[in-house]
Image: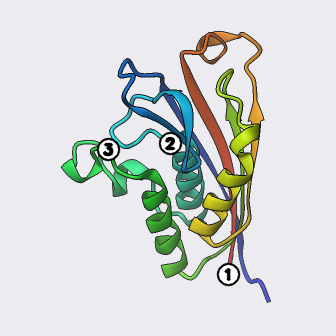
Amino acid sequence: MIDEIRVGNGFDVHRFGGDPERPLILGGQRFEGTGLEATSDGDVVAHACAEALLGAAGLGDLGEHFPENDPASANADSIGILGRVADMVRAQGWQIANIDCSVIAEKPRLAPARDAMVATLTRTVEAPVTVKGRRAEGLGALGRVEGIACFASALVTR
């Protein structure tokens, strides 16, 4: 029997970087193109999922647990961070029911790697994750292809 249900919302956004050697990683998958500027690997999908889980469980935010000024955060694997967050949530007695993500990007197209993204994210949090691609239709910084954003919602129960 479920005694408690909570929902958390997560958001992350990063601009494209200037280093052509930096890989573009979304949902744990590599895409063609220049990567995103970030302390970690810049995976906005993993970051938004982690923020949503932390919010749902009342555990603060990523900056509290993985500070940008911590040398351990430099180029950190965001899927690894997401896995650690999922473990923290479960350690508080929560069960992760699901996470739903909307990625806002003019490029790259997510469809070719969506199944792999979903599989990686689902395996990492040990719960169903869905990923949808959305376009900004040319509006604002995202529409001008200056970066990528992701919104995520997580449901946890206990």
Residue most extreme to the left: 71
Q: Are marks 3 and 2 in contact (CB under 8 Å)?
A: no
- Please name the residue shown 35% across and 53% down the image: 64
Q: Amino acid at mark 2?
A: Asp
Q: Amino acid at mark 3?
A: Asn
Query: How far apart, in angstroms, are the residues tagged by discs 3 and 2?
Result: 10 Å
Quick one: SS at disc 2? loop
Q: Which residue is mark 3?
A: 75
Residues 42 and 55: in front is 42
Q: Are marks 3 and 1 in contact (CB under 8 Å)?
A: no
Residues 35 and 158: in front is 35
Q: Amino acid at mark 1?
A: Arg
Categorize mark 2 by other alpha carbons within 10 Å: few (<14), some (14-19), many (20+). Answer: many
Residues 73 and 95: in front is 73
Query: How far apart, in angstroms, are the residues tagged by discs 2 and 1?
Result: 29 Å
Residue 158: give its label. Answer: 1
Q: Name the N-terminal-most of marks 2 and 1.
A: 2
- Please name the residue shown 72% across and 46% down the image: 114
Categorize mark 1 by other alpha carbons within 10 Å: few (<14), some (14-19), many (20+). Answer: some
Instruction: Relative to 96, say whether 114 is above or below.
Output: above
Quick one: SS at disc 1? loop
Give the x, y percent position of residue 40.
Answer: 36, 43
- Please name the residue shown 69% across and 70% down the image: 127
Give the x, y percent position of residue 80.
Answer: 43, 61
Residue 43: give its label. Answer: 2
